[in-house]
Amino acid sequence: MAEAEPRYDVVVIGAGPGGYPAAIRAAQRGAKVAVIEKEKVGGTCLNWGCIPTKTLLASTELVAHAREAGSFGVKIEGITPDWTAIMERKQTVTDTLVRGILSLLKANKVELIAGTASLTPGKKVLVKGAEGDSTLEADRVIIATGSEPAELPTFDFSKPVVMTSTDALALQSVPKSLIIVGSGVIGSEFASIFSTMGTQIVMIELMDRMLPTEDSRVSKQMKSTFRKQGIEIKTETTVKEVLEYRDDGIKVEISSGDVLEAEKLLVSIGRRFNSGGLGLEDLGVELDERGRILVNDRMETNVGGIYAIGDVVGGIMLAHVATFEGLVAAENATGGSSTMDYSVVPACIFTTPEIGSVGLNTDRAAEQGIEVNVSRFSFGALGKAIAMGEDRGFVQLVIDAGTDKVLGAQIMGPHASDLIHEVTVAMKLGATAEDIATTIHAHPSLPEAIMEAAEAAHGKAIHVAPRGK
């Protein structure tokens, strides 16, 4: 008699920042759950993205602060970054967090199955693992297969001198020179890391400004900051042709006709959806022309019982968005009723200085024909920021001209990734600029900059000189 196939209420494919929370939430709601992962739990974010880059940035920022110690009255001599030790620490951090996720899955009685999954008719999931194939029966399936770095046909990625972001996180030594193709979030973060380590960097950007999805003021000021750090940025430019691959470098011709050479070249132009090989076409699951899985606000595909979340559904491709999508899908897959709300989603860029944003910026407000008041406050006028020696940047609030409600914010400066959440909560609650301005903020503190920007919206800022005086 054949052995019965294991049956689960919910099977999650992928244990990244969307998949493993979905599995845990489904288990919390009483479901029997399995999660299938072909590589490491935590996915790209934990192993080859968010956490590794932030760990490297923590080290390089410490190097930068040590070099500036003299201006704080502290003498530090012989500052010597140890790239090998920095990379070892990065791995220790990711390994610690991976163990934490494994413990959480075990504590919630979620079965972790190693292998590559695909869907077959009859609500069955085929798993190909190192020890052979197995088939699971599932009442509901949540697809959380994520994305991977996009590649350009211009470059031969089999050459060691050409890197994706994943490759860059495995470098055994710091390159003396680096060409970065793309000046978005990923490219800019790597520029901050390697510039501090002494790498000579040229960034190539197709659009007319770096960080093209950010507010134009943020892009302009970050470009100025990068240039002061010695990073060269070429906008409205593409790599026309690779002239030479060498063991120790690469030579390219760019669209202006100039020739650039560097030890390494990093391609950071976005990501592509991991929807292939899942058997979705055979089941009739709808995808768009780029391979994005189409879902509704309940994270349901057009096929009953199949959900999809995270990068593979496109939209706002951020780890924290994937997490919330996973929670929504898990609740709906276990008899609940939940929908995704994308109206207030913070985003952070961990450059130096950091960037935090939420809601509308001035460019999008203009595109949508929304009349807004824009109010700013500079960290150069904030006591805490000056005391910290981090007085670059500003807070910008985008405020509805008719209702005074805060529609968005952009923060560039110290701890922007933390500060943006005050505005995020305010927006979620429908707060006005007046509400923020009349909320007492501790002094001296960085959040005072948000209060001052809100006060300035009504001409009440104490630390902003009146115009024309």
Image (cartoon, rainbow, N blue to C red):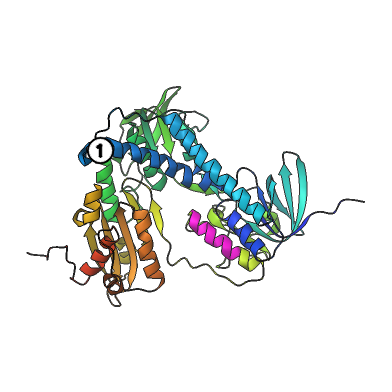
Magenta stretch, overall SS: helix
Residue reaching furthest left? 469
Question: Up-down: is 12 above or below 370?
Answer: above
Q: Position of residue 189 (x, y in %)?
A: 38, 43
Image coordinates of residue 102 in percent, x first then y, are 62, 48
Position above or below: 303 against 70:
below
Q: Nearer the viewer, residue 270 or 28?
A: 28
User: In the image, which residues are magenta?
Assistant: 319-329
**Residue 284 in sight:** yes
Residue 2 rendering spot, x and y as whole percentages: 89, 50
Which quarter of the figure has residue 408?
Answer: bottom left
- Asked if the magenta segment contains residue 326, the reply would be yes
Quadrant of the rendered image containing residue 399 = bottom left
* Residue hosting label 1: 68
Q: Residue at x 21, y 39 (%)?
A: 73
Amino acid type shown at disc 1 = Glu
Residue 391 shows in this picture:
no
